[in-house]
Amino acid sequence: MRAWAVVENKAPLQCIEVDDPVPVGTEVVVDVSHCGVCHSDLHFWEGSYDMGGGQIMRLRDRGVTLPRAIGHEISGRIIAHGPDAEGIEIGEQCAVYPWIGCGDCDRCAAGDDNLCMRQQSLGVLRHGGFAERVVVPHARYLVPLNGIDPAWAATFGCSGITVLSAIKKLQPQAPDSPVLLIGAGGLGLSAIAMLKALGHDRIISADIDARKREAALDMGATQAIDSAAADAAQQVEAAAGGKLSGAIDFVNVTATAQLATAVLGKGGKLIMVGVGGGQIPLSLAGMVFLARTVQGSNTGTPQDLRDVVSLAAAGKLSRIPLHRMPKDEANRAMTLLNENQVSGRIVLTKGAGASEHALARKSADP
Ligand code: NAD
Ligand code: ZN
């Protein structure tokens, strides 16, 4: 099968031939119909992370080998399965949970594959959705869509569950208590949709890009603040009517973490999701006097994926702007995302052909 793969870090993806999957045991083969392009795909393509303090983490030192077909926001149809796969039907359209654990540890037993120390995630350690087909080790990683748009549902495997998981970490939070969301890209917009679906109605979005702030307001944010403004913290507090009790940072660089900690009041919670990198000093006594929580959040669980699909099926979740592009334009999709020109999510589709959209920003889905 064909796979759009990172062959060399920071070089254009290449369309390579990889072995067609033959499922064994409980494995299920999914013919990928849609794959979202996440900023984490860009980090993978770069091959390293800024860990702060001059430390760099290289993916090759963490067992990642190239070439690798990236892409972890996957939906598609079941086309084959091994003899031990149960509870699925050939032809069924599913969302795929990509953050696959080892299956043997306590975390996996508890259903927390995202916290497994020996993950085998699709698009990272196994070929992902930029390939024509993916191998899913077990049916429990598949959630039937029952008619939900597969382009939208593809994004649930990362954006959807990541924002749900981060928002759960903010709880308890009164519905009218203002929440700050830093970053209004694919995740930030999904978080606005998720907060609203869960009944929250005061959402302050902050982004450095005016078009992203506009998109946040279109999604239902109450206010949108320029986080690069010198008085950004004062603007956030003015919008909130005082200090806040919750913030989620979808950028998570030094400047944004400083903004979030500046506006949180006593008992405030900062949930870190972005992996922009850097570091902040942490006042140890200050953590106590302010009874603060600073917590990292890494994707979500298979149950989170079932919950996101249920919210969508119940009509509670708004769609973020989606921009369909054929998989043959994977490189253009990556470039647009790298240039910060994508508002919402690009979703790669099967097959070749002209892109539906000249510039992603201008052409939200109907
Ligand atoms: P995106 O490219 O769609 O959006 C990023 C947004 O951040 C853009 O709107 C951009 O304008 C804004 N931004 C950039 N720098 C900023 C700054 N200094 N201040 C304010 N806004 C700024 O990216 P995405 O797909 O939404 O992903 C966001 C981050 O989350 C990435 O680092 C990604 O790797 C990470 N991520 C983490 C998890 C997790 O489980 N923790 C899951 C998925 C993605
Ligand atoms: Zn992702």
Image (cartoon, rainbow, N blue to C red):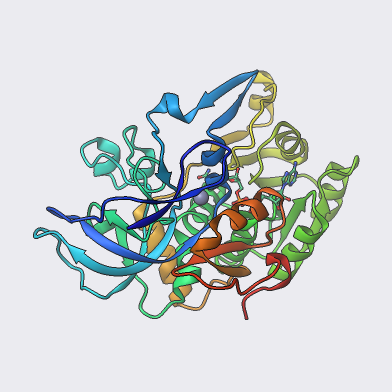
Which quadrant: the N terminus?
Answer: bottom left
Q: Is residue 230 above or below residue 303?
A: above
Which quadrant: the C terminus?
Answer: bottom right
Query: Where is residue 129, by image quadrant?
Result: bottom left
Query: Where is residue 150, by image quadrant?
Result: bottom left
Q: Could you tell me which residue is drawn at 25 percent across and 61 percent down?
A: 29
Counting labels gives 0
Q: Is residue 100 above or below residue 345?
A: above
Q: Is residue 189 visible?
A: yes
Answer left or right for 302 relative to 336. left
Answer left or right for 133 relative to 244. left
Q: Position of residue 351 (x, y in %)?
A: 45, 70
Q: Residue furthest right?
A: 230
Q: Nearer the viewer, residue 186 or 273?
A: 186
Q: Position of residue 259 (x, y in %)?
A: 77, 38
Q: Could you tell me which residue is drawn at 54 percent across and 37 percent down?
A: 296
Answer left or right for 150 relative to 268. left
Q: Is residue 221 visible?
A: no
Answer left or right for 159 relative to 256. left
Q: Position of residue 47 (x, y in %)?
A: 53, 33
Q: Nearer the viewer, residue 308 or 80?
A: 80
Query: Where is residue 222, by image quadrant?
Result: bottom right
Q: Nearer the viewer, residue 83 or 249?
A: 83
Q: Could you tell me which residue is drawn at 47 percent across and 55 percent down?
A: 161
Q: Position of residue 279 (x, y in %)?
A: 66, 25
